Amino acid sequence: MKKATVIVIDSFGIGELPDARQFGDIGSNTALHICEAVQGPKWPVLKELGLGNASMLLGNELPGCEAVENPTASYGVMREVSPGKDTTTGHWELAGIELEKAFTIFPGEYPSFPEKLLKDFIEETGCKGILGNKAASGTEIIKELGEEHLKTGFPIVYTSGDSVFQICAHNDLYPIEKLYEMCEIARRLCDEYAVGRVIARPFDGKPGEFFRTKDRHDYSIALPEDTILDHLQKNGVETVAVGKIGSIFDEQGIDISHHDSGNPACMDRTDLILNEQSDKDRFIFVNFVDTDMVYGHRRDPQGYCDEVSRVDSRLRGFIEKMEEGDLMFITADHGCDPSYKGTDHTREHIPMLMYSKGGKSGNLGIRTTFADLAQTLADYFKVPPVKNGQSML
């Protein structure tokens, strides 16, 4: 049976897009700046596959992960058509949806959210009040407001450079079921404002030792149209999601959804799935989030580099489990340059490495839309073409 796997190394951008100035991201380059900040050889499997070759298409040599003479994968870079640099926009375009209008981004300064939205949220959740109401790092805001939250019982509500309404609450005050219930209310209220995601951000610990737990959950805005997941599912291909993929796509078009949290669990799950035998054609969609969530937003080049190394160390095992004719794609969804200003995502090209077990490799060039991935999957599984993109096969 046919099997294709897409691995998204979250936020692993590879150089500013032509319109980066509009997003305030001139000069951003996640992969390059990590390689410049961390000396020595790195990422041997990605190097063999052609990550350095892909970077050279934009004129940038990656120190320690240089171009190789005969890469084992087809390599390229992809430009984003949709207006945005967030998780939802990037993943949706990879799956074939090209947005014409950006999701709503709120101002970073206090107050961020519309007064009516907060009034309705307080009234419908019964929480009496909120803290925050500004853009902030998730780890910093619990340092700043966690103790006041414990005293008042008010949830912390904050945003970022993405289109998000995030609700942060301590487990002692808001059991996870209660927090999720509040997020479901917020999701309904945020639809009117075209907010991409509502995110539950539970935390634990005591003042001075607060920490976020693994029970984060994303609530996506409804998809405007079918994605490649729906398209494959309707044509008899079994679709499997790992990590936050199910949340990003609101579980739409997904047969089996594994909500594993953190890269170690998601990598272990991917390994198990690739070991499984199926009597159906199968598409596996995986997100490795820690590069973005743990290291990119916290502006930690060394940590980011080490996390990519951990992913790299598992890739060889994933490849060894592939059968003749299987496809594996390694890509990203946006940038989050850990050496750049601020703590937000960056508007960048993403790498595209397409490995075929027993197949050919070559130069895919600079692709003009992330949706080329969706069209390639339709072509590979021999189902009718999707609306956007061109096949890379």
Image: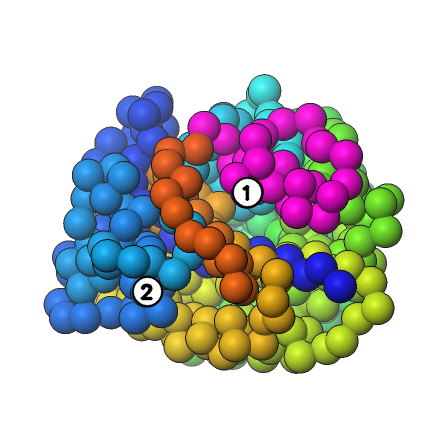
Q: Is residue 254 magenta?
A: no
Disc 2 marks which residue?
Answer: 48
Residue shown at 34% from the left, 31% from the top: 17
Residue type indicated by callout 1: Leu
Crowd band around label 2 with a 10 angstrom C-alpha radius: few (<14), some (14–19), many (20+):
some
Q: SS for tag 2? A: helix
Q: Which mark is residue 393?
A: 1
Sort mark 1 into few (<14), some (14-19) or many (20+) by Cα contacts within 10 Å.
Answer: some
- Pick the residue in front: 345 or 175: 345
Where is residue 40, by image quadrant? bottom left
Does residue 185 lie above or below 40 as drawn? above
Give the residue at the far top of this rendering: 100
Along the viewing direction, whichever of 83 and 211 lies nearer the viewer: 83
Q: Which mark is residue 320?
A: none
Colour scheme of the picture: rainbow
Given contact means CB atoms under 8 Å apart, are the residues at marks 2 and 1 in contact? no
* Front label number (2 vs 1): 1
Q: What predominant SS class does the magenta segment belong to?
A: loop
The residue at the point 66 percent across, 41 percent down is 379
Which stretch appears magenta? 368-393
Please say if 194 is above or below 65: above
Residue at image location 34% in from the left, 24% down from the top? 19
Q: Is residue 142 visible?
A: no
Provide residue 75's location: percent of width, then percent of height. 39, 48
Which x, y percent locates residue 298? 34, 59
Which tag, 2 or 1, sits closer to the chain's start?
2
Type of residue at label 2?
A: Glu
Q: Residue at x 86, y 44 (%)?
A: 234
Distance of label 2 from label 1 (alpha carbons) = 20 Å
- Give residue 32's position: percent from left, percent from top: 22, 51
